[in-house]
Image (spheres, helix red, strand yellow):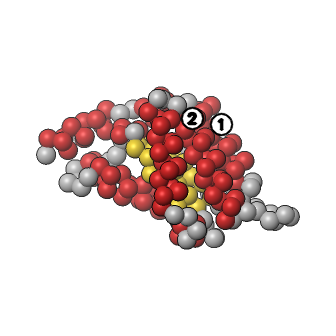
């Protein structure tokens, strides 16, 4: 119980998203997502959350389980699951815990092993540990883009329809 209370306080006091992710940084990340999406038919969304809502924090589940559940909820809320080819990817970052989740839709997961996603998360986590948020997210965008290009390339002459906003979401 004490751990849940401590976690609750940490998440309520976390206001880092707006401090760390200035508008110019968010614009650069948006441009990187847009440039990536010019190469494939997939969709990439970034969701940055300072802290979890109380309804998540009071659960008895492990932090890993709670964060995964929240990432899945954001995956649905942001419409990443609703792309034509089911090839959307959510890069979810929880600042209060320095925790990352990658959630890929079923169309893409058929082609990619869980280990590939775990390796991407580890690379992003290394950058976050030293405070390189933009560098880490840029690397994650490039990694996800490479997977999407390999499995869902944009054909020559194909007109790409942007199904989701490229702007990172601050939740």
The residue carrying pointer 2 sits among few (fewer than 14), some (14 to 19) or many (20 or more) residues within 10 Å by Cα, namely some
Label located before the other in sequence (1 or 2): 1
* Label 1: which secondary element: helix
Which residue is denoted by mark 1 in the rendering? 28
User: Mark 1 near mark 2, Cβ–Cβ under 8 Å?
Assistant: yes
Q: Position of residue 84 (x, y in %)?
A: 64, 70
Residue 165 visible (yes or no) = no
In front here: 114 or 145?
114
Residue 134 is labelled as 2
- Report the Cα–Cα distance between label 1 and label 2: 9 Å
Q: Position of residue 131 (x, y in %)?
A: 48, 29
On the rendered image, what quadrant is the C terminus found in? top left
Q: Position of residue 63 (x, y in %)?
A: 29, 49
Q: Residue at x 66, y 54 (%)?
A: 146
Q: Residue at x 57, y 35 (%)?
A: 134
Which residue is outermost to the left?
1
């Amino acid at each position: 119980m004490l751990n849940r209370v401590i976690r609750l306080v940490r998440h309520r006091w976390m206001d880092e998203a707006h401090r760390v992710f200035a508008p110019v940084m968010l614009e650069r990340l948006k441009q990187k997502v847009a440039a990536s999406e010019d190469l494939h038919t997939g969709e990439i969304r970034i969701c940055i959350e300072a802290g979890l809502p109380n309804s998540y924090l009071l659960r008895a589940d492990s932090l890993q389980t709670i964060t995964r559940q929240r990432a899945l909820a954001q995956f649905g809320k942001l419409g990443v699951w609703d792309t034509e080819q089911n090839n959307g990817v959510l890069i979810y970052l929880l600042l209060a815990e320095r925790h990352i989740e990658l959630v890929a839709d079923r169309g893409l997961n058929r082609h990619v092993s869980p280990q590939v996603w775990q390796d991407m998360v580890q690379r992003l986590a290394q950058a976050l540990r030293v405070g390189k948020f933009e560098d880490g997210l840029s690397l994650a965008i490039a990694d996800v883009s490479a997977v999407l290009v390999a499995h869902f390339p944009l054909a020559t002459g194909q007109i790409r329809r942007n199904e989701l906003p490229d702007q990172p979401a601050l939740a």
